[in-house]
Image (cartoon, helix red, strand yellow):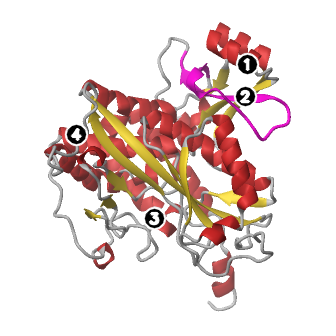
Amino acid sequence: MKHLDDWLNDRKIDEVECLVPDMSGIARGKILPAKKFLKSARDGNLRLPESIFVQTVTGEYPEEAEDTDVASDTDPDIYLQPDPETIALVPWYKAPTAQVINDAYYGDGRPVEIATRAVLKRVIELYDEKGWRPVVAPELEFFLVQVNTDPDLPLQPPVGQSGRAETGRQSYGIDATNEFDPIFEDVYDFCEAQGLDIDTLTHESGAAQMEINFNHGDPLWLADQAFLFKRTVRHAALRHNVYATFMAKPLANEPGSAMHIHQSIVDKRTGRNLFAHKDGTDSTLFRSHVAGLQRYLPQIMPLVAPNVNSYRRLQPYLDAPINVHWGVDNRSVGLRVPISTASGRRIENRLAGADANPYLAIAASLACGYLGMIEKLKPTKQIEGSAYRLAHTLPRTLYDALQRFDACRPIRELLGDRFCRAVDYVKRAELEAYQRVISSWEREHLLLNV
C-alpha cells in the first residue's frame, strides 16, 4: 500500500481506474478518486459483482450459469486486490489518471477461480512446482480501419497521410507503415508512459494491418502488457479518427490477425533453457512440450479462438494454420520452430487469434505444453513444405470447438472444472446470440432467389 500511496501522490493523480480482465479480455472495473481508491484498497473494500466473469461480449449473462455453482444467482461481491506492479499512468487523459490491474478474491481469501488472471497464475504455479519457469513473447496483429458506425457495412482501410487508402498488400512496407506515423507516434508515447515493453513494429500482409512484437519475459507480465496494449492502440487510433481492431478476421478478402505466442521453459534455479542441449539439439522435454501442444490445442480452441469470427481466420494460404503440424522456420504450420541458438530455443504457437484474451491464450498454450511434458508425449515427425497440403484438423466453428473442449478431461482437471463450465456457458450464449442475427450475405443471395 505504501508503494501505491507514494506513486499516486508523487504524480498528483486525480483518479484511478481499477481494471479487471473479463472472459473476453474486456477491461471491467471501477473508476475512483485517488484518495477513495487508497482508502478502499487499504480497507479491503474494493468490490465488484462476481458475475462480471460470466458476462458475454454482448453484455448479457448466461442463464445456465445461474443454475449451477459457476455463478450464484445472488450475484455476490468479490474483492479486488490491486497488483502494485501494474500501476501506470493512463496517458490519453488530460487529468492525471492512473490504472491498476486487480486480482479477485472471495471474502475468505480464496482466489476467484473463474477470474482469467487467476487461471494463468494457476498454470504458472504448476510449472513452478516442477522447478520450471515458462518464458513467453507474444506478437499481436491488428488492423487500422475507417470509422464504421453501421455494423451492416463492411470495414474499409483508412486514409493515410498521402490522402489515399491502401488498395494492395504492403507486407513489411516501410512507407506503408509511415502512412500512419501520427498514430504510431502516439502509440509509442503512450506505451513508454505506461512502461509497456514493446519491440518491433511491422506492416503485415493485410491492407493497413500491423504487428507489434513484445520482448520475452514472465507470462503474467506479458499478459498484462498485451491486455493494456490492446486498449492503448484503440485509444491512440481514436485520436486520429481511425479504429484499431483486434478482430481475428475483420476484412473479408484479407488475412486475419493472430497473437503468435513464442514459448520456452528455463530451469528456475540456473536459468538454462530446457528446450535444447548444449550442442543445440532438441531436448526430450522440448519434444514432449510440442507433442502436448499438438494433442491438446485442438481441444482447447475456445481459449485461443474464442469468437465466431475467430474461425474465419483459420483458412489455408492466408498466413494462418489449419492443423498442428510442426516444422523449422515454416509459417504454414500451426507450431513453428524459429531458427535459434540453444539458449533461444522456443516453439511458436501460431493458432491464437488477436481477439483472444491474452491471459487465457497464454494459459492455454502453456497448459497444453505442460501436459505434454508430464505425460511424456512424443510429437509427430516434423514436416517439410507446406502444411496446407495436409488435412484441416482444427475445429472449423465455435460450436465444434466447444464440443471438443467439453470432452477434454485433462484440460478440465488442470484449469479447473468450474472455470471450464464458465467458458462453455459464456461462449454458447454468444453463439446463440450470433445465430439469431441474419447476415447481409443471406439477404443478398437468399431473399429473392430461394
Spot occupied by residue 37 in the image (x, y as percentages of width and height): 73, 17
Nearer the observer, 358 or 273: 273
Specify the quadrant of the image occupied by residue 34: top right
Q: CA distance from mark 4 to mark 3?
A: 36 Å
- Disc 1 secondary structure class: helix
Quadrant of the drawing holding the C terminus: bottom right
Residue at the spot of label 2: 98
Residue at the spot of label 4: 274
- Compared to residue 107, the image places residue 279 above or below, namely below
Spot occupied by residue 140 in the image (x, y as percentages of width and height): 53, 54
Nearer the observer, 425 or 64: 425
- Disc 2 secondary structure class: strand
Magenta stretch: give its range: 77-106
Residue at the spot of label 1: 8
- Disc 4 secondary structure class: loop
Residue at the spot of label 3: 397
Amino acid type for the residue under numbered disc 1: Leu
On whether residue 179 falls in the magenta region, the answer is no
Amino acid type for the residue under numbered disc 2: Ala
Nearer the observer, 290 or 225: 225
Rendered residue at 74%/48% (across/down): 235
Spot occupied by residue 335 in the image (x, y as percentages of width and height): 32, 59
